[in-house]
Structure formats: structure tokens, C-alpha cells
Image (cartoon, grey):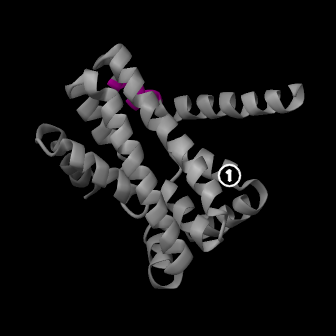
Amino acid sequence: MLRKLYDWVLHWAETPYGSWALFLLALAESSFFPIPPDVLLIALAISIPTKSFRYAFICSLGSLLGGVIGYEIGYSFMDLIGFRIVDFYGFNEQYYAVGDLYNRYNAWAVGVAGFTPIPYKVFTISAGAFRIDFIIFLIASAISRSARFFLVGWLIYRFGPGIKLFIDRYFNTLAVVFMVLLIGGFVLIKYLF
């Protein structure tokens, strides 16, 4: 079933509605949908590499708006909808672990989840449920999701269709390396200044 859903997402790259599908997929993935928008972003960017940054922007915008919806689900509708979504994905234990992460790391927890393959929807819903500061959530989400999608867009713009195989094969490793470098940069800045 998941494979059929994956193929259905990819088919949108071959239609004139690809940009709208990308926006809606990114929006849905940030709050409840299982397929990450990277799949369609890569397909669209490879089809027209000169529009890679445009597609990355559309994906970032949709994801940020979807994150706000996820936050609102957790903030206002956790009992009605939020726990059902968390339970559907089998993330009950992770939900409470995310609450602990918010208490200790706040924006860092959102940033890491927004950039890496960690299920972002769990963090958006949990952010609202645990009442983390909305502005911090919004800024961390905007930076991390945009970094993720613009990195994919830039790689395709720079290296063309051949990069798709590389991204598919090493995405998790690339995401972890980027986060280590980002956090290391902040630590370095903290101790130097």
C-alpha cells in the first residue's frame, strides 16, 4: 500500500499540477501524511533543473504552513485528533519523548526534526500539545525545513539528474552530517564570542 502511495505521489511530477501537488504534499506531510515531499521535489527539480529553487521554495512554504496546522492540532485538538494521528503512526512512546526533548532543547528539537528524516509531524503536533513558544517553533521550522529542501534543490540544480541516486542512497547520512556541522558552528560561535 505504501508503494502505491509513493508511486501516486511521483505521478504528479508528470502533470501540469506538479507545483500545487508539491505544496499540498508538503503541507500534509508536516501534520499527518506519511510520504515526505522530498520525493516529489526531487522528481520536479530533475524534470526542470532551472526551477529547482522555485520548487524548494514551494515545498518549504507548504511544509511551514503544514507545521502550523500540526501545531494547532496539538494545541487545540490533541484529544480530538492529535492522539489519533500519533497512535495511527505508532508514535505513542515517541510523543512523550518529544515532550521531554522540548523541555530540554526547545528550538533545537524542532530544528533537528525539521531537517532530518525524523517524522516531523510528531514534532509539530507535540509542539502545540506541549505549548512550546509559537514564534520559536515557527523560526526553527522555517530554517530547518527550508535548509532541507533548498539543499535538495541546490544539489539537483548543480549536479543534475545524477544526484538523485546519490541523494536517495545517502540522504540520512547527509542530513546527520549537516546537523553536526550546524550544531558545531553554533557551539564554536558560543565559545568564541
| Predominant SS of the magenta segment | helix
Say which quadrant the N terminus sits in.
bottom left
Q: Quadrant of the C terminus?
A: top right
* Numbered range of the magenta stretch: 164-170
Look at the picture and state if 99 lies above or below 167. below
* Viewer-nearest residue: 50 or 35: 50
Quadrant of residue 85 within the rendered picture = bottom left
Residue 139 point in image, percent of width and height: 59, 49
Among all residues in the image, which is located at the extreme top? 159
Does residue 45 sit above or below 107 in this rendering?
A: above
Task: Give how far across and how far down residue 137 sits, in percent.
Answer: 60, 56
Which amino acid type corresponds to the residue marked 1 in the rendered image? Ala
Depicted 140 relative to depicted 154: above or below: below
- Relative to 101, 7 lies left or right: left
Residue receiving disc 1: 107
- Residue found at the very far bottom of the displayed protein: 80
